[in-house]
Amino acid sequence: MVQQYRCPAMLSHSTHSPTEVLVMNSGSSSLKFSLIDHSTEEVRVQGLAESLGTPDAVLHLSRVGREKEIYGIPNAGHSQAIATVIDQIDGSRIGAVGHRVVHGGEAFSGSIRINPAALAAIRHCVPLAPLHNPANLAGIEAAIERFPALPHVAVFDTAFHQTMPRHAFLYAIPHAFYEEHKVRRYGFHGTSHRFVSAEAARLLGKDPADLQLITAHLGNGCSACAVKGGLSVDTTMGLTPLEGLVMGTRSGDVDPNLHQFLAAALGKSLDEITAILNRESGLLGLSGLSNDMRQLAEAADQGHSRARLAIEVFCYRLAKGLLALAAGLDRIDAVVFTGGIGENSAAVREKTLSHLRILGPVLDAQLNAKHGRESGGSITGPDSRLLALVIPTNEELVIAREAARFLDHSINPPSR
Ligand code: AMP
């Protein structure tokens, strides 16, 4: 109900119909946002506030057809960053706010309009995602403070994977840990796997129900997912986003005895070892140079042997992860590459496919060089037994679509 808006800037525009969705993705010291027109799906404004809580806090803003803008917001937290964003945009058409929430545990298999019970459930999941969920909550609370009358919708990274069967999500540890403490594999990047698997179906002109895919989201965090008939049946990440593939700074799978070994050998605490596995491992740990694939590719070209090694391990472990996921499928209709690395690095795609030779891929070098962030499509040739696709992901769009589902009801609530 438009009269309920308490924000003065919005009251003055209350005759506009709400066509826009504000999408928010809050990290511990950052806030990414986009303002998306839900009917055209055009991004009107997008930006990033970073170094929040420090004197260097800064807001970068891009509006369609305008020069990039930068605002210093020293010591701003999430709340002040959101206030600055709202001051800089025309908020009068915002009808809903969509929030990325990393961990929804077993409580959420879909998106939900946030209410006190949902907030409590998200808070309940903090021990499962201690780095992410508190930041997500800070963003949600700050946005609700600013837009108290709008529907706020939580879109969970874990929700898409709630269709995994028990044999895929259980660890082989005493069952009481699952029953009493919900220790199980959850999986993450669900919005991305869901989006690119649906896009793959569209690209191939097939019903998602008839497709069996393996999607590989390769960004700073990396995970792969077996998608059968449009549903996640297995994925590489687990209880936390540390399990599975090699990532920018995360180790992915290691021997579960590693903590004990490092504690004894180096006298490190559990917390210190966990931090090493999350922040100093992966591509960064292996190369000793960088977690950024672009930088590693350049260094490898110039003969940096550890950069080369890091890329080699990354691609081999990725291929191994993709093959393991095939256990959840009857056949592989396509492997889909997405995320910053998946969309942009033809070399990583080529190397990974070379480790999948058992599936008979025949790479088309021209298509592999051509497809990327700007255009999705096949990168394998007509003789290939395995179809490999590149499909740009768009997690913000998924969140905007989910939030838009709550738009009409909140503004014109059904009379029943
Ligand atoms: P994301 O988290 O999806 O933004 O992806 C970040 C990762 O994508 C980083 O490792 C970047 O180095 C990598 N990336 C972005 N552009 C390129 C590129 N042109 N070539 C290789 N890697 C890239």
Image (cartoon, rainbow, N blue to C red):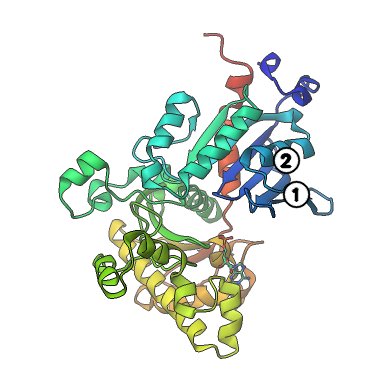
Find disc 1 in the rendering and name its residue: 61
Residue 321 showing in the rendered view: yes
**Image position, residue 375 (x, y; %):** 64, 61
- The kind of residue tagged 1 is Leu
Tell which residue pokes out farthest to the bottom in this image: 303
The quarter of the rendered structure image containing the N terminus is top right
Task: Out of 190 and 263, give the one closest to the viewer.
Answer: 263
Q: Nearer the viewer, residue 330 or 398?
A: 398
Task: Find the residue positioned furthest to the front.
Answer: 267
Which of the 4 image quarters holds residue 274?
bottom left
Residue drawn at 67 percent across, 49 percent down: 49
List x then y, in percent, for residue 261. 25, 71
**Is the residue under label 1 in contact with that under label 2 (CB below 8 Å)?**
yes
Q: Quadrant of ligand 1?
A: bottom right
Q: Secondary structure at mark 1?
A: strand
Kindly identify which residue carries mark 2. Answer: 85
Question: Residue 256 in the image: x percent, y percent?
Answer: 25, 65
Position of residue 100 relative to residue 270, above or below, is: above
Q: Position of residue 222 (x, y in %)?
A: 46, 62
- Name which residue type carries label 2: Val
- Looking at marks 2 and 1 on the same chain, the residue that comes earlier in the sequence is marked by 1
Label 2's element?
Answer: helix
Q: Residue visible at 38% across and 72% down?
A: 317
Report, in whole angstroms, how far the alpha carbon at label 2 lies from the one at label 1: 8 Å
**Label total for image:** 2
- Figure check: 29 above or below 384: above
Crowdedness near tag 1: few (<14), some (14–19) or many (≥20) residues, C-alpha within 10 Å: many
Does residue 99 appear left or right of residue 352 in this picture? right
